[in-house]
Image (cartoon, grey):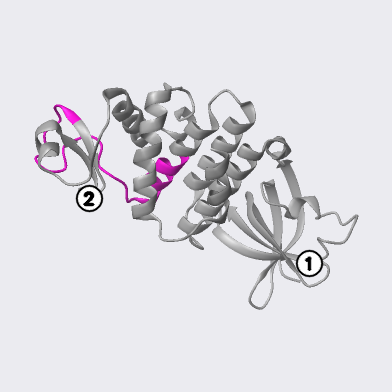
Amino acid sequence: MADQIKVRGMVISSSPIGENDKRVVLLTKEKGKISAFVRGARRPGNHLMAASDSFSFGIFYLMYGRDAYTVVNAEISNFFRELTSDLQKTYTAYYFLELAEYFTVENEDESMMLNLIYASFSALVKGIINPRLIRYIFELKTLVINGEYPEFFVCRNCGTKEHLTGFSIFHDGILCKDCAKVSKDVMEINGSTLYALQYIVYSDIKNLFTFVVSDEVLTEMKMVMARCMHAYVDKKMNSLEILDVLD
């Protein structure tokens, strides 16, 4: 019999297979994104029934067959059930998982993405920070982890660090006030908004969810990130449609 493979991670999607089984996508520290079958997970009383649901985080024990993994056991340390009691938090969390599945790949080191999801879910559960701010932090940090994101520290046109006042997705980043006057699709943002965006880019994940912003800054962050996600993500996220209505 083949040895069991032990991985730490989270169920980022789950779907029924046949009458009794499930297919899950796990985001793991050791093997990145992997798909696996959970036999009997839809059968009442099965020991893997809850462990095969989205949001479940913990240790998973896998067996590798001819061409697929099978989950044979799990030790779940956090189900994040608190998220299911609030619609906005629920769909925000599902949106995060959709983005994670979109950006991650198999057999790559995805530990930063896994850590970001866990930290974001924890922030949603605590309820101290506005879920909308958590969303914009998650979106931008996901782009940063993926390696493609706008420039927020120097003017994309002339390179100056002074008087950075305009965001342009056409230029893929921030512009100084002079360059903004002669550029396309420029959105004016204030200094506090720019600082928040810069902070998200350079901060460690453990320090991301430690600040709050004014309503004005939150609105500007929403507009910036809407432009960014439209430019960098070419897939329709199902949870986003509901989330946008709730927002």
Left or right of residue 186, residue 146 in this image? right
203, 107: nearer the viewer: 203
Left or right of residue 145, residue 115 in this image? right
Q: Amino acid at mark 1?
A: Asp
Q: Amino acid at mark 2?
A: Phe
Tell me the quarter of the picture where residue 46 sits: bottom right
Tell me the quarter of the picture where residue 38 sits: bottom right
The residue identified by callout 1 is 21
174, 182: nearer the viewer: 182
Q: Which residues are magenta?
A: 138-164
Magenta stretch encompasses residue 143: yes
> Height in image: 39 above or below 103?
below
The residue identified by callout 2 is 170
- Name the residue at 13% across, 27% down: 162
- Name the residue at 50% across, 34% down: 132
Look at the numbered disc 1 and give the secondary structure of its residue: strand
Left or right of residue 59, residue 107 in this image? left
59, 189: nearer the viewer: 189
Q: How many marks?
A: 2
**Label 2–label 1 contact, CB within 8 A:** no
Dominant secondary structure (helix, strand or loop) of the stretch shown in magenta: loop
Q: Compare marks 2 and 1 and give the one earlier in the sequence.
A: 1
Q: Position of residue 135 (x, y in %)?
A: 49, 38
